[in-house]
Image (tube, rainbow, N blue to C red):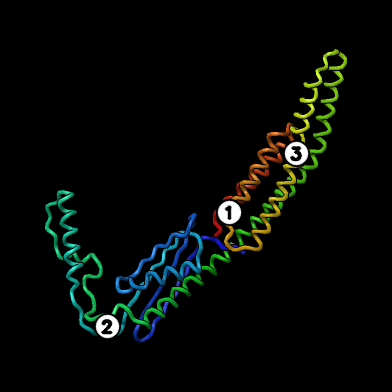
Amino acid sequence: MPRSMTGFGRAEFKDNRFEISAEVRNLNNRYLDINLKLPKTLINYEFSLKELIKKKVFRGKLTTTINFKDLSLENGSFVINQDSVQFYFSLLNQIKKHTGLKDNITLDHILHFKELIEPENYQKEDEQVGTLLLQVVEQALDNLNEMRNKEAQNIGHDIIYRLQLIEQAVQEVYDRGKKTARSELKKLSQRVKELVASHEIDENRLELELALIADRVDITEECMRLKSHIDIFREIFNTKEEIGKQLSFVLQEMQRETNTIGSKTTDVSISHKIIHIKEEVEKIREQVQNLE
């Protein structure tokens, strides 16, 4: 079964040494776009975290925010990160020069930036920290997917309902099309009689008229293909997980066949059914855009 692309998940861990929390939020997107917000002290785990995310989420704009606190450092000593201080001071000077501001740069301005002060001799790579971090993020992703699964169930119910409406309408169009074809052939027969009566028979023209009208009024092939697309849609929806792109393609084919039927028919009743089918296909398309 598919998943919705939108959702939120959170997880946290805390003991006498570490405090870790992770929040993940996913929004609609054509591809997987990962935005990872990590503390500077955990930047070395960026690759591992992205690989973990790719195993859990396949499409969407996913933002992961991680907060980390080493409780064992609360009573430790800290040092100034001189490189960061110098960088931000230089950056503020560039902004001041660019904007033409005359105000002096103060300590308060610099302290708005993070990570100017860090623990002394802090080890940025710690096996235990890495294990816990991955566990917390994985749990947050699992919670995200649980929410996405529930939302997808609601979307799925609506899609299946609308698919049934389309299927019913196609059958009605098919049945009506048979009657319309017979009516058109009767009109053709009358035209032939008129030609015979006036002795103005052109064999080539007659064959052309027959071929054109037969092709124009016969919507059997389009209806059969439309029914086949509905079956394929159901099969993909019920048996696969990453289905958003595939279903979008099937809907394009359904729309194409519907347009062809609409262009062929002169029957008002069929035209109304075609409008209804188009509306339902568009509603399904909007829902499919929310699926992974």
Picture layout, residue 217 above or below residue 102: above
Picture layout, residue 148 above or below residue 219: below
Amino acid beneath label 3: Ile
The residue carrying mark 3 is 219
Image point (68%, 59%), residue name: 235
Picture layout, residue 218 above or below residue 142: above
Badges 1 and 2: C-beta atoms under 8 Å apart? no
- Residue 33: percent from the left, percent from the top? 44, 59
Residue 63, label in figure: none
> Is 35 or 267 nearer to us in this picture?
35
The alpha-carbon separation of the residues under discs 2 and 3 comes to 76 Å
215 left or right of 15 in image: right
Image point (42%, 68%), residue name: 50
The residue carrying mark 1 is 287
Picture layout, residue 16 above or below residue 24: below
The residue carrying mark 2 is 73
The alpha-carbon separation of the residues under discs 1 and 2 comes to 49 Å
Badges 2 and 3: C-beta atoms under 8 Å apart? no
Disc 1 or 3, which lies upstream in sequence?
Answer: 3
Secondary structure type for disc 3? loop
Q: Farthest residue to the bottom: give it.
A: 16
Q: Farthest residue to the front: give it.
A: 204
Amino acid beneath label 1: Gln
Disc 2 or 3, which lies upstream in sequence?
Answer: 2
- The image quadrant where one finds the C terminus is bottom right
Tell me where residue 211 sits by quadrant.
Answer: top right
> Is 14 or 190 nearer to us in this picture?
190
Secondary structure type for disc 1? helix
